[in-house]
Structure formats: structure tokens, C-alpha cells
Amino acid sequence: MFKIKYNFLVLIQILISILNSVILLKLFGVSYKADVYLMSIAIFSSISLLQLMFVEQFMYFYNDAKTVGNEYAYKFYNFSLFFSLATGLVMFLIFYIFRNFLVELYAFGIDPERRDLLVKSVTILVFSGIFNLALYVNIRFLNAEMHFSLPYILEMIPGFMTLLMLIYSLIFKLNNIEPILIARIIGTVISLSISIYFIFKYINVPFNIVLKHKLAASFIKNSISMRFGHNIHNLLFTPITSNILAVLPSSYASIFYYAQRLIQIVYSLTTGPSHRVFVVKVSKLFSNKKYDEIKKSAIQYLKIVLILYVVFSVIVFLIIPYILPILSSKLTTQNIWMIEMMFLFLSVWYFILTLESSVTPIGISSKRSKIFITTNTIFIVTYFFISFFLKEIIGIYSIPVAATIAQLINLILYVLFAKKILKEYNVTES
């Protein structure tokens, strides 16, 4: 499960992310432009999850199709590819038409200067929606076929294109965020093109125009219900968080998102490669009805990632006050202290997410969407009330505190559901 080459690719991915953040700090510091850039990325990442409602379960249904035969599975892939492109185009049109509404929803109460630039930024990013779904399907297909290196490279390309534009902007002293966002879209198109070429050329998947498949109805239905459960969390968490940040002083959004980027780097480095392999393994074990092996795999996975997560979190927390002043002279001592404290709070939340990542694949593989609808509804209600109650008391720190409490409740529920699922399947098979 632990592969050095995958961690090496994640290190490159993280290096690109770090360089992006460093140059972004040098260009914009914690200004209103930095706020808008980071908020626009967060908003688009959130609404992109709406698209996933239609193909979320691709890998799990593809693995089921593989038990029937390669020809059957490849036809299902071709159907999913065409379906994802068509859905991406429709969703892009919807996002484009309602872009002003989306900004109001996610950043209600934001000042006019940031709002106008935010609308422009989101308008640019929604073009990426045409290609995101198809890229998601291709990456999941490659994972199902046990190709893990190429997907990491494909995921790096948008960030790498962003990095090139950031470097260009720094050298020529450009002060606009729009070209940086356009570079991100170009990277997505490049990734999709490479993935299509590799799948049909080197994996030798026959290219067919498949507009229907026996699995289509159940695949789409289960994807919608499963993603609906996830989206209760993902779609509502971002607007709640953004609206808290929007009414706080300018630069607070930048502080939160910079700290979040740091903890996400730690999380990606420690869980990313192992979790990707673990998810695929659980999916295959479910498809082949080897339920006894799932618990063993989860324990093995946790033994690796928990130690790594704690070690890297402590290291990053300790070096923040020494590294950030070197990276940007635009950060004040107060800014750096707040980023460090935000990282500390967020690290507790992400520790719970690390634990949770060992049990959620069991619920997803079982295709029981009610589990995620229930747990994520509880999460978002808990997060909403606690964050809005605490924001007047502890300000920006209400976000990680509320998220940690809500996530802890989720973890307990996911563990109980996972035990119940494995017990039911083992009893059925015996």
C-alpha cells in the first residue's frame, strides 16, 4: 500500500502547491486580490462537486463491470466518458448563467470591490467545468486499472500551468489574477487530452460511441444519491465558511486559506498515495466479496498514515514562524501568528479526517448513500450552529473549532456504520 514512487509524485505535487502559495504571497500578500483569488478557487471547487453527482460512483460500477468481462467494462467506460462530457457542457452553461447568484450565495455581505472581482474570477473558472467531469472519469478509470502514477501527473498539470503564469506575473510585475485562473483551465484541458490519448493508445481500450449501457441507470442513480450525501457537507460548508470570512476584516480570508493550504499539503503528503491505493483495494474487495480482508486493510492503512500525519504536522507548525517571514515581507507579525494558530486548530480537524478516511470507503463501496446523507446532514447542522454561535466570541477560529466538533461526531457515526456493513455482508456470505 505504501509506494515510494507515489509519495515522490505527491512530493512534486506538493512542491508545486508550495511554490504557487509562495509566489502568490509575494504577488498579493494578504490583500483583497489574494482574498478573491483564494475564495474563487474555493467557490468553484465547491460548485464543481455538483457535477460529480452524475459520475461519482464510476470506479465502483466499473469494477463491478470488470467481473462480467473486459468488453462489458470498456463499453461502460465509453458510455461514462461521453456522458461526462455532455453533462460537463450542460453544467457549465448553468454555472455561467447563474454566476452572479453563486457569488451572492457564497459571499453574501462581501464589500463591492471584492465582489466585482470575485464575479469576474468565477466567470473564468466555470469554463473549466466543461472538462472536469471527463478528467475525473479518466483518472478513476486509470486507478481502477491499477495505474496510479499517471493520475498524479495529470492532477499536477493545472497547478504547474498556474505556477508558470505566477512566475511570469512575478517577473513582469503583473498584478492581475485573471491570467492565473486562465492558466489553470489550460492545464485542465491538457490533462484531459493526455488521459484520453493514454487510455485509448496504451491501455488499448476500444473507442466506441456508446450512448446507453445496462449499468447506466443504476450508475447515475447511485452517483446522484451518493454525491447528494457528500454535497450536503461540501456544498454547504463552503458558503457557511465564506460568509463568515466575508464579514471579517479584509485579509482574514487569506489567512484562513493560507493555513488551510498548509494543512492540506500535510494531509496530501501523508494520506494521499496510501489512501488512493486503499480506496481502490476496498472497491475491488467488495466487488469480489472478500469482506474479511477489508478490516485488515484499514488497520494497515491507519498504521502508516497516522504516524506520518502527526510527525509532519508538528514539523510544519514549528517552522511556520521562521519560514513565512522569508517567503513574504508583506506579512506582519500578527498575520504570521494568526496563520500559525489557524494551522494548529485545523490540524486537529484534519487528524479526525485522517481517522475517518479509513472507514468512509467501506460505506462508498457498499453504495449505501443514506449513510452519507445522514452523517453529512448532522455535520453541516452542527457546524452551522456552532460556528455562528462562536464567531462573535473567537472570530475566525470559530471555523476550525466548529468543524472539529462536527467531524468528531461524523467519525463516530462512520465507524458504527462500517462495522454494521461488514457484519451484515459477512453474515450474508456465510
Image (cartoon, rainbow, N blue to C red):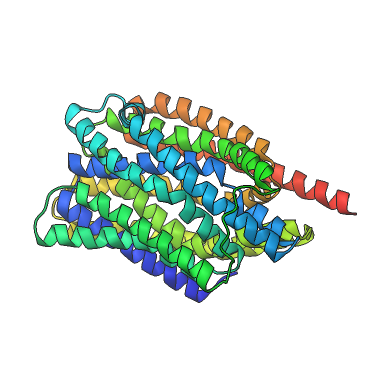
Residue 146: x and y in percent read 59, 68
Q: What is the quadrant of the C terminus in the image?
A: bottom right
Query: Which residue occupies the foreground of this view, 208 or 64?
Result: 208
Question: Of all residues shown, which one is farthest toward the front?
Answer: 209
Is 43 situated left or right of 31 in this image?
right
Query: Which residue occupies the foreground of this view, 118 or 342?
Result: 118
Residue for point 67% across, 60% down: 73
Is 108 situated left or right of 306 in this image?
left
Residue for point 64% across, 58% down: 75
Residue for point 43% across, 43% down: 89
Q: What is the quadrant of the N terminus in the image?
A: bottom right
Query: Which residue occupies the foreground of this view, 416 or 99?
Result: 99
Question: Of all residues shown, which one is farthest toward the right?
Answer: 430
* 71 up-or-down from 404: above or below: below
Give the tally of numbered discs: 0
Residue 299: x and y in percent read 66, 61
Residue 53: x and y in percent read 54, 40
Residue 412 seen from this side: no
Query: Which residue occupies the foreground of this view, 22 or 131?
Result: 131
Residue 180 seen from this side: yes
Residue 423: x and y in percent read 81, 48
